Image (cartoon, helix red, strand yellow):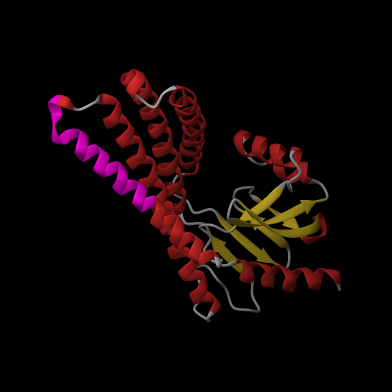
Amino acid sequence: MPVIWKRWLQLLFALLFVALGGWMLLDALAAPAGAKTAQIWSALAIVVMFAGCAAIFAYELVGSRRADGRARGAAGHGAAPAAGPLVAVYSNLWTTLGLAGCVSFAAAGVMMLLASIAGGSDGIGWPGFIVGPLTAIVFGGFAVIGAAQLRRRGWAFRHIRIDAAGLYDSRIGQTIEWGDILSITCRTLYGQRMIEFDLADPERHLARLDRTQGALARLNRAVGFAPYAITLTGLSVGEAEIITAIERFRSRQDR
């Protein structure tokens, strides 16, 4: 199944669950005197969680359409002429949506727990006591990390530049020279495309990351992933443009 249809199906299912949660909420509130608190919390959890999913899926669909447009010849924001350096920027809208999604999942986890507490035998039951707190802690932690990073850099766009010197990432604050790159791999992880770079001396570059990003990079290495990667979601240019620029400038280095 093409990726674009998978994303449409994901969006459709998310919207269906939002509608289901909305119907449950309206049904509970139609007769306030007999409304069960557990049903209200459960309905709110479904609406909040899947509304966040729907927003992210919709953004990915818009991003796919833009990528298709660039593939047909339209210029992407931050792109450069074929002979010159390529500059790509990450959308702060995607960062904000990701942060909002984490907050919505954390809130849904709290609501699941409240539904279990309020419902007794009529509530979600023991899964709510396990899944609810776990969801709230994990996604709440991601939200705190994302908010701290967003506050640290403000609304400055993270950008990547590929030229004859190598690959510059504003998150690192320095250029990774072509000679430091051992191999490049394109990978799909949970539906997200990324380009991984195996580095000759990863610590020299990763040392400039903040504490949180550095810890995540070392965790990636520990589980078998490359120490540095470019994620394509939210980026102003597509995978083909990135690979073309890398091949063009890296081949010059090998001459």
Where is residue 101 shown, x and y percent of the image? 43, 43
Residue at 77% of width from left, 45% of height from top? 202
Q: Which residue in the rendered view is the most extreme toward the bottom?
A: 73
Task: Confirm whether the magenta stretch covers residue 19.
Answer: yes
Q: Is residue 98 above or below residue 62?
A: above
Question: In this image, 196 relative to 35: left or right?
Answer: right
Where is residue 233 shown, x and y percent of the image? 54, 57
Q: Quadrant of the C terminus?
A: bottom right
**Magenta-highlighted stretch: main secondary structure?**
helix
Q: Quadrant of residue 163?
A: bottom right
Q: Quadrant of residue 231?
A: bottom right
Where is residue 218 shown, x and y percent of the image? 71, 38
Question: In this image, 199 relative to 217: left or right?
Answer: right
Residue closest to the eye, 181 or 166: 181
Q: Quadrant of the N terminus?
A: bottom right
Task: Confirm whether the magenta stretch covers residue 224.
Answer: no
Where is residue 103 shown, x and y percent of the image? 41, 37
Q: Which residues are magenta?
A: 14-33
Residue at 47% of width from left, 49% of height from top? 95
Residue closest to the eye, 159 or 46: 46
Residue at 35% of width from left, 35% of height from top? 45
